[in-house]
Every structure is written in structure tokens, then in C-alpha cells.
Amino acid sequence: MKDIITLAIESSCDETSAAVLKNGREVLANIVATQIDLHKKFGGVVPEVASRKHVENIDAVIQTALDEADIKFDDIDLIGVTYGPGLVGALLVGLSTAKALSFALNKPLVGVNHIEGHICANFIEDKNLEPPFICLIVSGGHTHLVEVKDYGEYEILGRTRDDAAGEAFDKIARALKLGYPGGPIIDKLAKIGNKNAIDFPRVYLDEDSFDFSFSGLKSAVLNYLNSKRMRNEDVVVEDIAASFQEAVVEVLVNKSIKAAKVKGYNKIVLAGGVAANSGLREKLIQKCSENNITVKYPSIELCTDNAAMIGCAAYYDYIKGKISNLTLNAVPNLKL
Ligand code: KG4
Ligand code: ZN
């Protein structure tokens, strides 16, 4: 059977990325031009700056991906692109480029939900992974607990009612003046801090709910910091980082295990930028082994935003005949 070559494009936030994949799961190239340094000085992503940078980078990023994969435009079978959720101006850069290529090359266009892309990163990481499984998607913009019934078939069990897990990491890091993005910095500090030093709240909501809420935890950390500052008392940043991370991780892990048990699964898959968190991985592995549940997670490069994961999702849509047309628009608040 002829190989299916996908060119994938991702520009939903602050990474301009293009990838080339063979048969959906083999990555021939995955180029990521990150804008982190550009946004660092603002303490977060500035949407207009992100869009402008995507425009500057996108052609070169695509050409580099094609060169690295040794693929010509003619060899491509489909073009996969993120069309939401994300920053509208950022999404439009990747989407317009993909639509222009699709039109000019006469190749099918497949619009991909970014959250679905994060789940699919696991199919690239582990070539033998097959649905069904429970997936915890934790990133800067999303926190979802999902039952993945089949490729492209999802049932949302729970989602955050306020801040996303990564957003909470970024906001706490900002309050501690640690820089952006906060997740990796807090992760590093937490390794040398005492996770039992401060008893921050664990928010489980209603007993049977798989939803999350992190805004109360964020306020508790900010209140703790303010009260220390008002009394001119020193704080141990490492202990705050470790105690905060533990409070986030405990809820994420316990709810994921409960979801697996309630739904009768013995496989939990992690996805999204926060899946890079070492405390989360450690605790999930430990708790899952106590409960005879297998854990899977992508390598760090596939946890954070990249086009390879979008290409994988596009491939599974394509082989099911789910093709987009050229009227496809960016949908900033696209749901899974
Ligand atoms: O998936 P991603 O690259 O972008 C979105 O789709 O949102 O996730 C970025 C988020 C940021 O909030 C960042 O702080 C967080 O992932 N993150 C981490 C770690 N690495 C990245 N959070 C906790 N621990 C990490 N090691
Ligand atoms: Zn993402």
C-alpha cells in the first residue's frame, strides 16, 4: 500500500510548527520555532506579537520541515492544520497558509482540534498504543479528563471550571516573580522543596464530579504570599512551589484514577504541556501501579505544542474521510 504523507501546521499559541509524517505515526520532521523568549519580558503570550511572529516564521518553518523530511510539495497527500482552540490571530496564520497550500497544490485540507492533537501525541510516542483509554489533557489552556473510545471518538468526563492546570502554574510563577512559562520553573524548584511544608487546598468539587477547579488554590497561594509579605516574613520559594505542585498533582491523579475505575479502564494516558511535569508523572506512575493501571505519556518535546501531534490527528480523520473545505475558519473556543 502507498505511504500516506501528511504535512501538518500548528500556530495556535506561541509556537510556529510544521511537521511531516508518514502513515500518521512516523515523524519524518517536526520543526518548532518557539516564541517563548519574545513573550518572556511581558510575563505571558501577547496575542498580536504572537501573530506577527508566526507570519515571519511560517514559510521557513514549513520549508525546513520538508527539507529535513526530504519531501517535496508534490509528495504530500494531505495538509493537516490546527483551526482551534487558540488565539484567533495566531490560528489564522497557520490556517491561511494551509488553505493556500491546499488550494495551490490541490491537496485535501484537514482541520484539527488542538486538544485532539495533544491526545494523538501519544500515538506517535507509542506505536502500539490503541484506544480505548482514559486521557488526562493538561495544558496552558485546557484541563480535560476524556474517555477516548476510538480514534477521533471522545467523551468528555470532566473539565476545568476556571483556570487550566498550566495557567495556574504560570500565574503562581508570575506571583513569585519566577518568569514565564511557569510550569517548568516550578517543576524544577519543587524538586528541592518540601511538598508538605504548606497545606494548600485540594479542590475535588462534588463527590462524583470529574471537573476541576484551580482558582481557589491559586487564591490560597496568593493569600499565603500576601500575609507573609505583610508580616515581613521570609518565604521559602522552593517549599511554595513543591506544596502548590503537590496540591495540583494530587487532584489530577486521584480524579484520573477514579475515572479509570468508574469507566472500567486499565490504561491512563497523559497529554499536554503539563504532562511534562515530573511530579505529575511520578505520582501517576506510583498510584497507577498500586491500582494495576498502565500509564503512558509523551516525551517532553511531544507534550508541548508541536505540529507532529496535529499531523497524527489529521491522518486518522483523513483515513475516515473527514476532510475540511476551504471555507474552514479559525474557531478560538473550539470544543473537543
Ligand atoms: O500544551 P502547551 O504547550 O500549550 C497549550 O496548549 O496550552 O502547554 C503549555 C503549558 C504552560 O502553562 C506551561 O507552564 C506548562 O504547559 N508546562 C508545565 C511544564 N512544562 C510546561 N507545567 C508544569 N510542569 C512542567 N514541567
Ligand atoms: Zn497545546
Image (tube, helix red, strand yellow):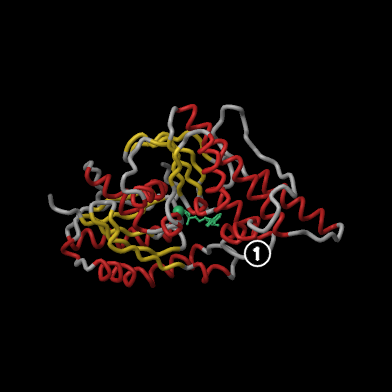
Q: Which residue is rendered at x = 19% and y = 56% of the image? A: 77
195 or 39, nearer to the observer: 195
When the figure is inspected, residue 141 is found, relative to residue 9, above or below; the finding is above
Q: Which residue is rendered at x = 57% and y = 57% of the image? A: 183
336 or 252, nearer to the observer: 252
Residue 130's image quarter? top left
Q: Is the distance from the Cβ of mark 1 to the nearest ligand 1 atom less than 8 Å? A: no
When the figure is inspected, residue 11 is found, relative to residue 267, above or below; the finding is below
Count of marks placed on residues: 1
**Which quarter of the figure is the C terminus placed in?**
top left
Label 1 CA crowd tier, 10 Å (few <14, some 14–19, many 20+): some
222 or 309, nearer to the observer: 309
Which residue is most to the left? 1
Residue 278 at x, y percent in the picture: 55, 53
Residue 10 at x, y percent in the picture: 37, 59
When the figure is inspected, residue 209 is found, relative to residue 236, above or below; the finding is above
Residue 56 at x, y percent in the picture: 39, 72
The residue tagged 1 is 178
**Mark 1 residue element:** loop
Q: Which residue is rendered at x = 54% and y = 53% of the image? A: 277
Residue 329 at x, y percent in the picture: 34, 52
Given the image, on which type of amino acid does mark 1 rest? Leu
Residue 75 as seen in the image, left or right of residue 36: left
Which residue is most to the right? 231
Residue 118 as seen in the image, left or right of residue 325: right
Q: Which residue is rendered at x = 78% and y = 55% of the image? A: 226
